[in-house]
Image (cartoon, rainbow, N blue to C red):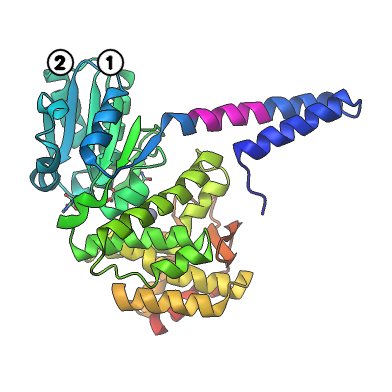
Amino acid sequence: MTKINPESLIQSAKLISFLLFSGYACHFSLFIIFISLKSINFAREFMEQQKVIISHCLRTSMAQAIAECEHDKLFILADQTTDRLCLPLIRDYDFVKGAHKIVIGDTDSNKTLESVAHVWQELGRHGATRHSLMINLGGGMITDLGGFAASTFKRGIQFINVPTTLLSLVDASVGGKTGINFGGLKNEIGVFNNAQSVILNTEFLNTMDRENMLSGYAEMLKHALINERKMWAELITFDIEQPNLKELQRMVAESVAVKQRIVTEDPTERGIRKALNLGHTIGHAFESFAMRRTPMLHGYAVAYGIVCELYLSAIKTGFPTDVMHQTVAFIKEHYGKLEITCNDYPELLELMTHDKKNIGSTINFTLLSGIGDIIINQTATREEILEALDFYREC
Ligand SMILES: NC(=O)c1ccc[n+]([C@@H]2O[C@H](COP(=O)([O-])OP(=O)(O)OC[C@H]3O[C@@H](n4cnc5c(N)ncnc54)[C@H](O)[C@@H]3O)[C@@H](O)[C@H]2O)c1
Ligand SMILES: [Zn+2]
């Protein structure tokens, strides 16, 4: 599959210019140059706006990120838990002392329009202007909701993401997707908008529970599977149950680089960004299925989705079965299993059909033919999907 990046677009534009001047090109080449340059500019703009700081000292990184955003007033958005556990780590920094704190309820049930309205009200009540700056201190719920609230307040104020969960460090805080749940649907309302900076520091993870650590780790596994074998091999041998946070900091940086590379190539998910959906088509169905019973953390659903979608990759696109079995064994050992029976298949299929990533009624999958060999826009028959669910139950 062809991967596009700004550099290759520049090369293509240069080549076409050369052909043009050599007398071989026609109006069509001019059109391609125009399109290429437009894509380069858009990708560059998106890439330049979001600065990811791999932080070894929170004080220094935050001071630098805040100093780079000229502002009149500073706001910090936290949820009840990050207010208690994470804010104390930064509260004494001089540049944070005058900031106004906004706190909302924690967990995804508070990722609502009501919470956004509360943030807007607090910003307004404390004199925020278009030149104010907001720091989102929390997991994916806070970075998604805070990013959305900031992007819409007075048509948009600047914000900095300081992710505090593993999932938000490696995934949610980077890539420009912001939003809230609405009408019973996840992430139904939102905008693409980049944080001015994202500060990645695993120091916050000291207070993180096992389940939330594993939830974030599933996204790291996904990044490794769509990237390269060495990263994958390191992840399935790393002790995530008792992690060395310094080691993890390096792995987080490498993992985020995978997401950033893909997002830079395709900011609005028209092509290669769909690689990030590996494990998510069936994963989202598991997540919604569980939500109607006992809710499950997103990363667990993704891990189970990866099991099924690696199986589909093995039978449809030649993914090596030894790598599939090793990944499945790792997931089974750490994530256990969501108990399902054949009677649940119709509901799971129904949920997959309604995934918002589908076009029409065709279920869209991202599959692999090997580690790092991504094949987007794949479909599978009903029988193949049921076979994958059988594999999940029996593995
Ligand atoms: N924008 C994106 O690209 C993207 C990608 C993936 C997920 N998401 C979104 O991210 C959200 C899930 O993110 P999450 O898993 O970080 O959930 P979360 O933000 O709800 O955090 C999980 C729990 O951990 C607590 N917590 C946060 N930091 C902590 C710390 N350092 N120590 C102890 N507890 C801490 C939170 O208060 C919360 O109770 C979902 O809303 C999902 O839709 C967005
Ligand atoms: Zn995910």
Q: Position of residue 9 (x, y in %)?
A: 67, 36
Q: In the image, is residue 132 above or below residue 331?
A: above
Q: Position of residue 35 (x, y in %)?
A: 68, 28
Find residue 81 and name its label: none
CA distance separating discs 1 and 2: 10 Å
Look at label 1 and name its amino acid.
Arg
Question: Badge 2 is on which residue?
Answer: 127
Residue at the image point whose x is 33% and y is 19% from the top: 155
Which range is magenta? 36-45
Q: From where the camera sits, is residue 179 visible?
A: no
**Dot 2 crowding, Cα within 10 Å, few <14, some 14–19, many 20+:** few
Question: Badge 1 is on which residue?
Answer: 130
The quadrant in which the C terminus is found is bottom left
**Which secondary structure class fits the magenta region best?**
helix
Q: Position of residue 106 (x, y in %)?
A: 15, 47
Q: Quadrant of residue 349?
A: bottom left
